Amino acid sequence: MNKFLMLLILSLFTVSSCRSDVDYIIKTQYTYTNSTSSRIALIFYDPSGMVIRAIVINPQQSKVENLSDDGPKTGIVKPFASNNAVVAKVLVKFDDVNKCLTYTNNQGLLSYENYDNYNPSMLNNSENSLVFDIGTEELNSAQDCN
């Protein structure tokens, strides 16, 4: 009986000491604004080229994504990090004019440092809001879609 009780106590101690409680949650709100006159689609691809998902934004409208992640006490959740899949490429398609703009390797939408209101001091906060305005500059950089 004493051996059983000792094993039970050791088991409980081991289980409780291996808990993976999260110390901190960081939150980031991403707002994607379409300030063009064309409907746009943001199409997300994984490293193998498979479409993960798409977001459609009508002209002069916005879409908001709220992301959270456990981790350090402060910081910014990476864009599109809520999916288990890794986003390797984002295609911005301007539907009305059949023009496309592609972002890879931390370009454009793939890195929070490229967002319009990003400031390095945001890394000291646990809650942040970032905005990416898709407008004339992006439309003028777009190429004909293949």
Image (cartoon, rainbow, N blue to C red):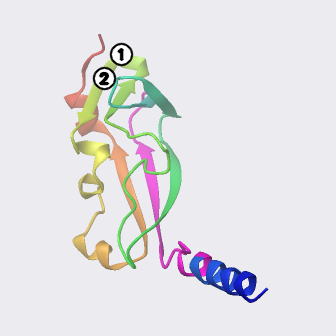
Residue 13 falls left or right of residue 68: right
Residue occupying image coordinates x 42% and y 27%: 38
Residue occupying image coordinates x 52% and y 74%: 22
Q: How many marks?
A: 2
Residue placed under numbered mark 2 in the picture: 100
Residue placed under numbered mark 1 in the picture: 98
Q: Quadrant of residue 99?
A: top left
Callout 1: SS? loop
Q: Dividing the image into 4 quarters, which one contains the N terminus?
A: bottom right
User: Which range of residues does the magenta coloring cover?
Assistant: 15-39
Q: Dividing the image into 4 quarters, which one contains the C terminus?
A: top left
Residue 3 falls left or right of residue 86: right
Residue occupying image coordinates x 74% and y 81%: 4
Q: Do the residues under discs 1 and 2 have CB atoms within 8 angstroms?
A: yes
Give the vertical position of 8 relative to 83 (above or below): below
Q: Which mark is residue 1?
A: none
